[in-house]
Image (tube, rainbow, N blue to C red):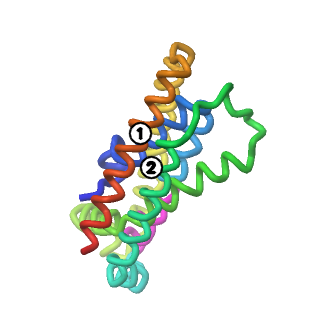
Amino acid sequence: MLGLSIAAPVGPIGVLCIQRTASKSQLSGFVSGLGAASADAVYGTIAGFGITVLSSLLLDYQTAIRVCGGLLLLYLGLRSIRAEPAETAVATSDVQGLARDYGSTFLLTITNPVTILAFIGIFTGLGVGVSGEYADAAVLVGGVFLGSTLWWLTLSVGVSLFRTRLTRSVMRRVNQLAGVVIVGFGLLALWSAM
């Protein structure tokens, strides 16, 4: 399984957020995590509110979605392998860079059709969304988003504590290692699409 951002936060999204926090800034890592949390909330909403047409459509096209996600992971991984460490932290005013960080992790998470299956399974097991009582679904989706956001905040803060101790040479190796891991997840996603 490619990995769910809520169930396996040390998967490709976790690696990407760690790498971005270490090479750019705490804000970059956190915003990257928010992209994953937002995609989790989208899938949670689909599962929790019983939007069966959309969930069926996503499941029908899961092979194409996995291929797109795998290719995106390969691109990001190769880019990370070749990346030189930043001289200084990214300024918090770099809105375009933060938007790219958010968007890339949102796309990576949303292109994992296994996530919708997990949410459907979890919500069905809890009886959420099947009785027509949508207040429970709204609370659960909100909890998923807030819990995921808290995880990404904790991860980015934790990594940023060590950021100042990392030399340029170590950061180059972090970028390369993160890139190799992300490429591996991309290949796994492409393989699972076959």
Which part of the image, by quadrant, shows the N terminus?
Answer: bottom left
Q: Is residue 81 left or right of residue 86?
A: left
Q: Is residue 115 left or right of residue 171?
A: left
Pick the front one: 38 or 72: 72
Q: Position of residue 149 (x, y in %)?
A: 49, 43
The local secondary structure at tag 2 comes to: helix
Question: Marks 1 and 2: in contact by CB < 8 Å?
Answer: yes
Q: Position of residue 115 (x, y in %)?
A: 34, 63
Q: Main secondary structure of the magenta part?
A: helix
Using the image, determine if residue 41 lies above or below residue 91.
below
Using the image, determine if residue 39 lies above or below residue 157.
below
The residue pinned by badge 1 equals 178
Please tell me which residue is depicted at 67% across the width and 52% down the height of the picture.
99
Residue furthest top in the image: 165
The local secondary structure at tag 1 comes to: helix
Using the image, determine if residue 44 lies above or below residue 16.
below
Q: Which amino acid type is marked by label 1?
A: Ala
